Image (cartoon, rainbow, N blue to C red):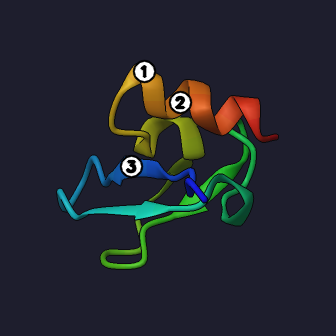
Amino acid sequence: MNETYVRLLCPECAKDWQEGPDELPAPEEMFHCPNCHATRRTSEFTRTERDLETLKQFQ
């Protein structure tokens, strides 16, 4: 089975990681970096446009 994930990158501390799209809030909702606790819209943490599209597809 192929598992879908969204690649994330914190715009403040540059932590990069991945999460399943079902584990993330909607793109326009607020999200907190687990490393530095920066708070921004989830869409601002997506690494690429493709990651953002994947997130939107599963919301």
- Which residue reaches farthest right? 59
Residue 35 at x, y percent in the picture? 32, 78
Label 1 amino acid? Glu
Label 2 amino acid? Leu
Q: Assess whether mark 3 and mark 2 are in contact (beta carbons under 8 angstroms).
A: no
- Which residue reaches farthest bottom? 35
Name the residue carrying label 1: 49
Q: Assess whether mark 1 and mark 3 are in contact (beta carbons under 8 angstroms).
A: no
Name the residue carrying label 2: 52
Quadrant where the C terminus lies?
top right
Instruction: Measure the C-alpha gap from mark 3 to mark 1.
Output: 10 Å
Left or right: 45, with 11 as reference point: right
Q: Earlier in the sequence, mark 2 or mark 3?
A: 3
Please determine whether, in this image, residue 39 is positioned above or below residue 40.
below
- Which residue reaches farthest left? 14
Residue 54 at x, y percent in the picture? 59, 33
Q: Earlier in the sequence, mark 3 or mark 1?
A: 3
Left or right: 30, with 42 as reference point: right
Label 3 amino acid? Arg
Q: Residue at x 40, y 61 (%)?
A: 18
Q: Secondary structure at mark 1?
A: helix
Q: Residue at x 63, y 38 (%)?
A: 55
Q: Residues within 10 Å of mark 1 (few under 14, many from 20)?
A: few
Q: Residue at x 72, y 54 (%)?
A: 25
Name the residue carrying label 3: 7
Q: Assess whether mark 1 and mark 2 are in contact (beta carbons under 8 angstroms).
A: yes
Q: Secondary structure at mark 3?
A: strand
Residue 52 at x, y percent in the picture? 53, 30
Residue 17 at x, y percent in the picture? 32, 64
Q: Secondary structure at mark 2?
A: helix
